[in-house]
Amino acid sequence: MHGFPFSDLIDVDVLHRRIPTRISGRGLPILFLHGYPLDSRMWGPLVHLLASDYLCIAPDLRGFGRGPEQAMSFSMSQLADDCALLLDTLQIRQPVVVCGLSMGGYVAMQMAERHKHRIAAMILTNTRANADDPAAAKNRHAVALKALKEGGESVVLPMLNKLLSVHTQSHQPEVVELVRSMMLATCKSTIAWAQMAMAAREDFLARLSDWTMPVTCVAGSEDSIVPEQAMRQMAKELGGSELRVVANTAHMTPLECPAEFAEIVRKSTSTLL
Ligand code: MLT
């Protein structure tokens, strides 16, 4: 894997809080929102390919990465408001591209409704617009309890096989290590609060047809967490927005195949450059 191209984490002081953020490059701003239980490091190889033409901004969402050891409760809408405040603080006035993976996609969808004037285009990858059904929400509560009782490792490590494709696991050991290290760095209270927040997230499916900004959807051909069909349904509700399916990737498509993902970013933002 390429060396990590971002700046070191910068603490951006936003009102009374700090948001650890990695910033690199220059050009059209892209806000990268990581998934669960991960952090801004997941965007490194992709940013390496994009930083010549884009200002890449990747925060650690509340409690994740170098966030506090003891996370407080949060909601997807609060995470979206954090991101808008981050852009204010960085004095980024022009509308940005928001690229969210999975949980980062849930946050991006909140931004699309709460801060739509800030968004020029969206890229939603390995994510879904529908909320949890009661069984899924109940399971999240059980996962949150297990993390608190038995430690974060007990719930995150079994996810590894689902996050990465068979191909990635056998050909990219450095990606496997990075994902493992991000998961193990996530403290148990963040795991628990994130599960509760995701269980309570809104359903956007019926509202997507009201969105006016361009949205590109990207799926992993082997993603069992968000199967291609769920993303196809989302793209359809978005008025036939483009769906790209990246072969040999599972739930971490931008990290598993950054070259193809970078091409998708370039193509979907070409009219904005
Ligand atoms: C993620 O990758 O962010 C999670 O799989 C999202 C979820 O659990 O719904």
Image (cartoon, rainbow, N blue to C red):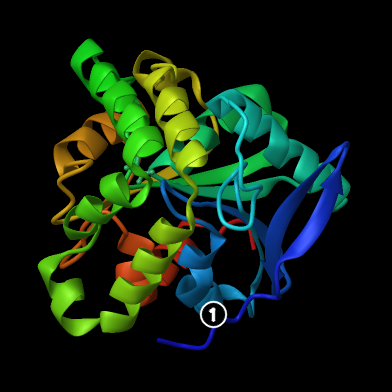
Q: Position of residue 152 (x, y in %)?
A: 38, 47
Residue 92 in sight here: no
Residue pointed to by mark 1: 48
Residue 26 in sight here: yes
Q: Is residue 136 left or right of residue 54?
A: left
Q: Is residue 53 left or right of residue 223?
A: right
Quarter of the image for residue 12 reads bottom right
CB of mark 1 near ligand 1 (< 8 Å): no
Compared to residue 58, the image places residue 117 above or below, namely above
Quarter of the image for residue 22 reads bottom right
Compared to residue 68, the image places residue 270 above or below, namely below
The residue under the point 59% across, 27% down is: 74
Q: Quadrant of ligand 1?
A: top left
Amino acid type of disc 1? His
Q: Position of residue 30 (x, y in %)?
A: 62, 57
Q: Secondary structure at mark 1?
A: helix
